[in-house]
Amino acid sequence: MNKKILIADDHFVVRFGTAIVLENHFKNIVIDYAESYDEVESKLKSEKFDLIILDIDMEGSLFKYMVKELKKIQRDLMILVFSSSDESEAVDYIREGAEGYLNKLGSEKNIIKAVKAIFEDGYYYSPKLAYELASSSSKKQVRDILSEREFQVFKLLSEGNGNLEIANILNIHIATASTYKRRIFTKLNVSNLVDLLKDYRN
């Protein structure tokens, strides 16, 4: 089945260049484009996409608030934030629910790695972003670090529910529940449920 990708950026060269990289390395993908936030909303309301590569500085941008607004339109949409800003600024977008961050100044290899990780694992955090997330987790409350959906999963995990139970309760696929669990572990810098519960109690 084809994966549908929306490249949202107000620069033609960026849209075209990103599309060429993806088409040269991935089979069974269909790519569409948007030049402004309004166009992004319009396309999402009329067509289903698996992934959006989202420039946060495009015309009409709502910055980090775009993430929740776009997921209101398509709940299962995966969002890869696309920016030339430092990873430290990406943390806010991840907390809002974005699946990953990609620096525009990165290499072709990084683009491929990010998109591959999102399709296979459900998220992509560069080593630097993972460090930023881990650093912030020691300074902030869990509720401030996780997205709304991740916090729902977090609470269910803390109550002793496994992936299957969480999937049934939230009416999501078990693979999706597993992905949320991995993302939560990464964001909170823990490797197991015991450490997770310790953070929750704190």
Image: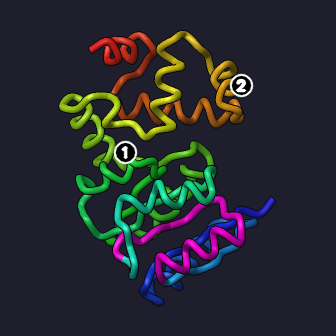
Q: Residues within 10 Å of mark 2 (few under 14, many from 20)?
A: few
Q: Name the residue that disc number 1 marks.
A: 95
* Quadrant location of the C terminus in the rendered image: top left
- Seen in the picture, residue 26 relative to 39 is either above or below; the reply is above
Spot occupied by residue 29 in the image (x, y as percentages of width and height)? 71, 68
Between 100 and 200, the one lying in front of the other is: 200
Q: Which residues are magenta?
A: 36-57
Q: Name the residue that disc number 2 marks.
A: 168
Q: Is residue 29 inside the magenta stretch?
A: no
- Seen in the picture, residue 101 relative to 153 is either above or below; the reply is below
- Residue at far bottom of view: 12
Between 42 and 93, the one lying in front of the other is: 42
Spot occupied by residue 12 in the image (x, y as percentages of width and height)? 47, 89
Q: Quadrant of the rendered structure where residue 146 is?
A: top left
Spot occupied by residue 39 in the image (x, y as percentages of width and height)? 55, 80
Q: Is residue 177 left or right of residue 64?
A: right
